[in-house]
Amino acid sequence: MSRKPKPASPGGAPAPDIEAMIRVDHAGEYGAVRIYEGQLAVLGRGRSGDTIRHMAEQEQRHLKAFDRLVNQRRVRPTALEPVWRVAGFALGAATALMGEKAAFACTAAVEEAIDDHYAAQIAALGEQDPDLKKTVQDFRADEAAHRQTALDNGAEQAPGYKLLSETIKAGCRVAIKLSEKI
């Protein structure tokens, strides 16, 4: 059975799959909350904990916004939520156990992948769904600030930074593709 093609947008390009965008963004914000929860379980005290807690609070705000969108627009959430629940917490805790710089390396990598993802969504939306576009633009700015905070806190000084960063970004890209569909 083949899928019907998406109708073309006014410019002739295929219309973006808004439901998939909301589904994957909801899953991604949920995963981010879980990563920060894992990091806080290990690094909850001190300056690093305060920095992580601030970013976690912003991610929680993002998740609540996408919770509303999922409900308002009747979008099926990803079926992979139980996987992201465990994987996100495990990634956050494991990198925090490697040290503060590794935890910040994780944040920098995740936020770089999400920045790229949100940029692609903004471009795909064009003039369609201005409310969703504004939400994604606002959250993208927060994610970029989180990445900069992580870099300012020594992310690139983590042992094996390049390998750790590339592995986490690859994992994020896989999670994005899976959450769009499943």
Image (cartoon, helix red, strand yellow):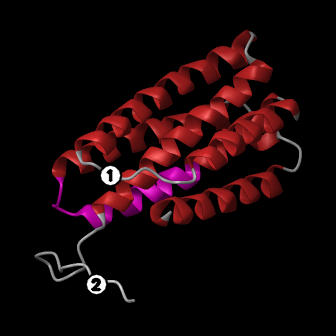
How packed mark 1 is, by other alpha carbons closer than 10 Å (few <14, some 14-19, many 20 or more), is: some
The single residue placed furthest to the bottom in the displayed view is: 1
Is 146 on the left-hand or right-hand side of 66?
right
Q: CA distance from mark 1 to mark 2?
A: 19 Å
Residue 69: x and y in percent read: 29, 42
User: Label for residue 119?
Assistant: none
Residue 46: x and y in percent read: 74, 10
Q: Residue at x 25, y 79 (%)?
A: 6
Q: Nearer the viewer, residue 39 or 163?
A: 39
Residue carrying label 1: 75
Q: Residue at x 46, y 62 (%)?
A: 180
The magenta stretch spans which residues?
Answer: 112-129
Amino acid of disc 1: Val
Q: Residue at x 63, y 23 (%)?
A: 52
**Image quadrant in which the N terminus is located:** bottom left
Tag 1 near tag 2, CB within 8 Å:
no
Q: Nearer the viewer, residue 180 or 158?
A: 180
Q: Is residue 57 above or below residue 122?
A: above
User: Label for residue 4?
Assistant: 2
Tell me which secondary structure the magenta stretch mostly adopts: helix
Q: In this figure, what is the number of numbered marks?
A: 2
Amino acid of disc 2: Lys
